[in-house]
Image: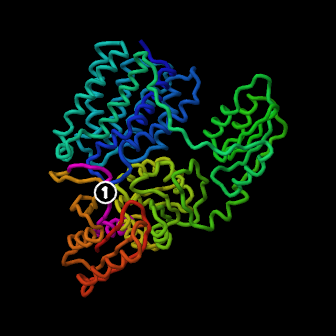
Amino acid sequence: MTISGKILRDAFISAANCIAANKKDIDALNVFPVPDGDTGTNMSMTLGSAKNELVLLNDGASVSEVAKVMSGALLRGARGNSGVITSILFKGYDKAFKDLKEVTSADLAKAMELGVERAYKAVMKPTEGTILTVARLSAEKAKEICLETEDVAEFWNAVCDEAERVLETTPDLLPTLKKAGVVDAGGKGFCMYMRAMGDVFSGRGIYEYKEPEAKPAEPVTIETYASAVGKFDGEITYTYCTEFIIKKAEGCESSLKLRAYLESIGDCVVVVEDDEIIKVHVHTNNPGKAIEKGLEFGSMNLPKIENMRYQHEAAGKADKITVSSSNKAYVSVPPEKPFGFVAVAAGAGIEAMFKDAGADCIVKGGQTMNPSTQDILAAVQATPAETVFVLPNNKNIIMAAEQAVKLADRKVCVLQTRTIPQGLSALLAFDPEADFNTIRSDMTKAFERVKTGQVTFAARDSEFDGQQIKNGEILALDNGKLTLVEKDINRAAYRLTKRMVDGDSEFITVIVGEDIDDQTAEELRQKLDEKFGSRLDINVIRGDQPVYYYIISVE
């Protein structure tokens, strides 16, 4: 029995549907109850980015074509550590299936093996008891079972059984899981999407999942087409503004299919129709493809194509920019200086601090919304420098940033900053007269000296290390470690700061979040001044960041 491209495509779509439907259950397995870009959410968004491209493939695509499309989309759309590891595991399919039209169970086993090898190499310090363990032992089982049966459904079922067996052992391998009384969230996601793929291999069909209905958009008529297009005049993410009018062919398909295709190759899409014509507006890097697809719906005359980059490139270079996680493309600018900087941040005050400190581009994102590799790549390409330093400022964004290194057209160095204070300290240590190695060393030393405290809230009821935590209680984290639970925000911040300060400390910086008013922040400043003001410099800055009431750094 062999697997065709159509079956493989449907299996990947089934996997994406399954994780989308069960992401909240996977999120609930996270050890810490802090609000964050959880495992299930990141895996779902990552797999969803591939699904969006796979659904456009026709039934005649080979397994090689399907795996290549899936792998590329996953790499660009990967979010969070779980998403990046998932994308790397699936990269094995692309490598194993190269030039193949159909595959056997032995080919699938080889794909799993290659994916695991790559994933272990990508993680600096692989931890057993995680998705890596589940994937590795499943791949070993696959290599064994493929020698015993050529029935893909039987083979895959045995591999899934092994994955689920290993998942149940993860608490014994990782003490934090045992304390929390849960299995590994990433491993659970792996098991779930493997079973969903198996549904297709065994003939049961694609895992059914209906996307939540989006708020219906205001209808656009032919008469209001010009004003609708005008709304996009300032949006410059794709190079070519392409417009054309199609005289509809008799019996042509719904224009919804044309819209779906255009959204896959561009943005700012407007498609409106009446009984005789379809009017189209799209920003894209491939106007020829847009026109070619339009011709499937009828005939057209003299489409209009304008190069927006020529019109706006000069203005775009002049200003520092912010790249949001909704960007789907980027405009690459040529280098104008030796070094540039990209920082990930959330909150108007924090973004302003990074820009003032010298960041060329800001990627909107952080704890609850981990930006994708594509988002970070967009900012790198928009930075006019020969070498771009990336400051992720969150441990769950580092891997996605590192994946952008191999996609960029310039040298990229990811500094492993895990917090906002670390990122700011690194940036402030930049010496424009130094060479690359000295700059990297000095910036690394600077952020490693920073202690970071964070005050947030419990996103759900949980138990950690024998302590009951209730939804909504105040949590204090010392360098990422859950330290204390409080009822009062300022008391938590004060206790946390006392814990962080030692005899070598010189500075305390408090970054105030969007949910803290000025009076509350001033009360904390006064309390800290009474305790430490005689010997330490205390600085309180409004960052307006979400999630964290306070971010505290001690140096």
Q: Which residues are magenta?
A: 440-463
Which quadrant, please, contains the N terminus? top left
In the depicted view, which residue is nearer to us: 410 or 308? 308
Q: Is residue 452 left or right of residue 336?
A: left
Task: Where is residue 157? Give x, y as percent.
Answer: 32, 20
Q: Is residue 286 left or right of residue 507?
A: right
Residue visible at 51% across and 21% down?
6
Q: Is residue 450 magenta?
A: yes
Is 528 placed above or below 270 here?
below
Q: Is residue 263 left or right of residue 361?
A: right
Is 534 placed above or below 314 here?
below
Please identify the quarter of the rendering in which residue 151 is found.
top left
Which quadrant, please, contains the C terminus? bottom left
- Disc 1 crowd rating (10 Å Cα; few below 14, some 14-19, many 20+) is some
Task: Where is residue 339? Give x, y as percent.
Answer: 49, 65
Is 402 placed above or below 483 here?
above
Q: Is residue 490 magenta?
A: no
Q: How many marks?
A: 1
Task: Where is residue 143? Give x, y as percent.
Answer: 29, 23
- Determine which residue is flagged by label 1: 472
Q: Give the structural element (helix, strand or loop) at label 1.
A: loop
Residue visible at 38% across and 22% down?
198
Q: Amino acid at mark 1?
A: Gly
